[in-house]
Amino acid sequence: TTMASSYSAAAPSSGGVEYLELTSDSLAAQQSHRLILLDIEARKRASTIDVPTLPADVRDRLREMGEPIRMFGEDLAAIRDRLRMILARWEVWKEQHEKGLLDGQMEVPRPDGMVESASAAAETRVEITETTYSHAPQELIDAREIMCKYSLGRSRYRLEIERRRRRGMIRWTRSKKRARLFDKDADDDADEAFGSMYHGDNLKQDSVLVKDLDDNCEKIYTSIRNQALEGSQYGDVRPLSAVCTSSLGNNSHLDYTGPLPKIIATGGWSGGIKIWNGGNDHRDVDGGETTTDEVAPLDLLGAKNIVHEDRIMGIAMRPYLTSTTSTEGLTTMIASASIDLSSKLCKVTLNEDAAADSMDVDDGNKAKNNQQLRYNIEECAHLKGHAARLCSVAFHPTGRFVATTSFDHTWRLWDVETSSMAEGKELLLQDGHAREVYGVGFHPDGSLVSTTDFGGVVQCWDLRTGKSACHFLGHAKRVVCSEFSPNGFQLATAGDDGTIKIWDLRRRRPSASIPAHTNLITQLKFSHSTSSQNGEFLVSSSFDGTGKIWSTRDWKLLSTLEGHEGKVMGIDVLDGRDCGVVTCGFDKTLKLWK
């Protein structure tokens, strides 16, 4: 018998041909054999099938297909595996029919739950989905040129640092064969070899760089393991929902000689923004002169009680002095996202009156003078356009653009320089998510942006071309935060399933999965890329009431921050050798850990 035959010929003759039908047992055995072969092929194909991640979506899909939504003894993972096998069988059976290996009477299951014959399935039209593109306005083209030039320069610098560290690792790990291979020309032609990056002297210099890097990492981890609560402050009359800290970004060497204080910004359910003291000057990171701060850590430096009409869900601070057009001494800016369908940009400026008065105040009148805060918070742009509540906001590394995400299944890119209170300059409205978009994060080179949604999908978009670079599936529930590592090739995501997943952008697959918390993870932050921290640790906050610090070398737990009386809503890292961490919570408090 063959796969396409259902009858057996007895014996041909000139007068006529007599055919004998196979018995019912033979036909049943033949069909059972075909089903076994197809099932084996379906099991091989199942690993490549994408299925929904949320339990509700899996149940809806099974219900549409007419399948039981849950078998006895099945857990959530087993239900997803059963759905995956059903879809895989459909694909394999359809391919077998197209190759003519199925007879017309064999029933082929359809994903929508109906059953049709193979001959009828061939007549079914296949819907073709097309990707459409729209013409980019000139403002978006100019913005892409800016981001492209910036990203190429940053990536060139970052890759050169990585090459030096890799060459130094050859020496540091005592890989003698590779070291001799790179040094083999040193004795034959010293002049020519000296200019090579793999010359012995150059390798030794790079090995010293790696040794210093490891020594600094050891000091950082020792400091983190000894961290304790430095201070706590009530931040608002309602819960604090977001926190961020100031940074130098990629401008570690600045011509500006004025003060660059470490400040902390918080946003809460009351709709206001406040600024707090975070410690010494940013230049202390690189061994500069220590500036004596007149106020203690977590002292209030500035406040604007009404910025939004409703709760603030996300907040971000622009790195210092990233604006190419501003000539002011302190040019940081705060962006906020609220459920009132809008985002606002607030400029932080030094209050000259408070600075002058502080010079003439004695200790007895200092408390009275504190009513006049050091910094002013002025609204400078109102970004309106989303059709649903906003979730997160992030500044591009250049500081000229800001991204917002929303429940309307889109994320948008705005121009900071040309936006105003009357009209926010929208450069890009990007759809592509099937569910509500929540998390957003920019690549340190400024070339990519990652967005996450409630369907468990993580999308990476190329800002220079406007296309989707890749996407990742792996979270079992909603994904609410994403953060790029300073090394440029790792992406951390987390959400409702309590796990942190590390994705390798080079191989486009997960490299680590950390069972971090027992409840929803609200925020992730890598340490700064400065020489004092070098991206050596990752911090996370969760609804389980804790914040945690993880090593980025082996993803092991370094420290657990316990002190909030309820959910921890946000977390961030202060730049500096003391590796300070700030958290805000549902208990209305802001806490500093050092």
Image: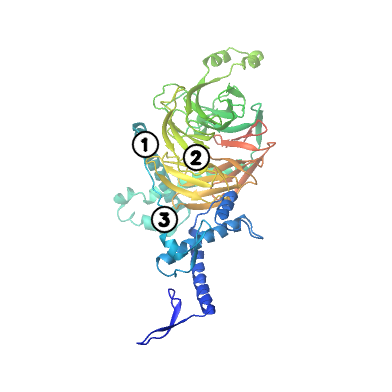
The residue pinned by badge 2 equals: 409
Amino acid under label 3? Val
Q: Earlier in the sequence, mark 3 or mark 2?
A: 3
Compared with 23, 475 (above or below) is: above
Q: Residues within 10 Å of mark 3 (few under 14, many from 20)?
A: few
Question: What's under tag 1, amino acid-wise?
Answer: Arg
Q: Is residue 407 visible?
A: yes
Q: Is residue 504 visible?
A: no
The image shows residue 385 at horizontal and vertical percentages of: 47, 30
For the residues marked 1 and 3, what is the alpha-carbon distance in whole angstroms? 37 Å
Picture residue at 39% right of the left edge, 43% below the top: 467
Residue 11, quarter of picture:
bottom left
Q: Nearer the viewer, residue 432 or 427?
A: 432
In this view of the protein, which residue sits in the foreground, 186 or 534? 534
Residue 126: assigned label:
3
Where is residue 94? Give x, y as percent: 45, 63
Please tell me which of labels 1 and 3 falls first in the chain: 3
- Image coordinates of residue 413 in percent, x first then y, are 44, 34
- Residue under numbered circle 1: 144
Identify whether 295 is placed above or below 434.
Answer: above
Task: Report how far apart the C-alphas of labels 2 and 1 lie in the structure.
Answer: 23 Å
